[in-house]
Amino acid sequence: MELPFALAIGVLVAGAVYMLLARDLPRMLVGFVLLGTAANLLILLAGRVGGMTPPLVAAGMAAPGADAANPLPQALILTAIVIGFGLAAFALMLIVKARAVLGTVRPDEMAAAEPRAGAVSSPPTPPRALPPPRREAA
């Protein structure tokens, strides 16, 4: 049972590395998600996969049996899924905003975010003061 999981983890890591090496932000995000999925499967595999009994304590016993499943890897994976989903959604919104502002999703073409080499940067301009709110006559 461990061999198919190991092969799936290997395929996911290979796909993640391929996508992360692509110079395109949406593909990099997909690679990040694939890498998170591979890590989750690795945690699941480390937590003994197989036909085990639920980790419930029977009446009159002090602890679950020796063949009981370990609930810790399952809790860690569930937490990692939730955090990974939130991070992926946040990164997707950053990609959408970068596309709207800069017109590209390729990091090589995002020169507006980085100063040019040898260029002297000017001090930032202070924000303009807002006019006072108008009051209507009663």
Image: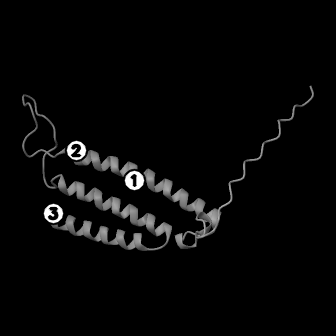
Of the pair 54 and 130, the residue shown nearer to us: 130
- Name the residue rendered at 7%, 40% in the picture: 65
User: Which x, y percent locates residue 136?
Assistant: 90, 31
Of the pair 131 and 124, the residue shown nearer to us: 124
- Kindly identify which residue carries mark 1: 84
- Kindly identify which residue carries mark 3: 2
Q: Is residue 90 above or below residue 62?
A: below
User: Which x, y percent locates residue 14?
Assistant: 31, 72
- Going by the image, does 56 lie left or right of 18? left
- Dot 2 and dot 3 residues touching (CB under 8 Å): no
- Kindly identify which residue carries mark 2: 72
Report if residue 1 is visible in the image: no
Kind of residue sitting beneath label 1: Gly
Q: Is residue 123 above or below residue 28?
A: above
Judged from this view, the residue extending furthest toward the right is 137
What is the quadrant of residue 19 in the picture? bottom left
Label 1 neighbour load within 10 Å: few <14, some 14-19, many 20+: some
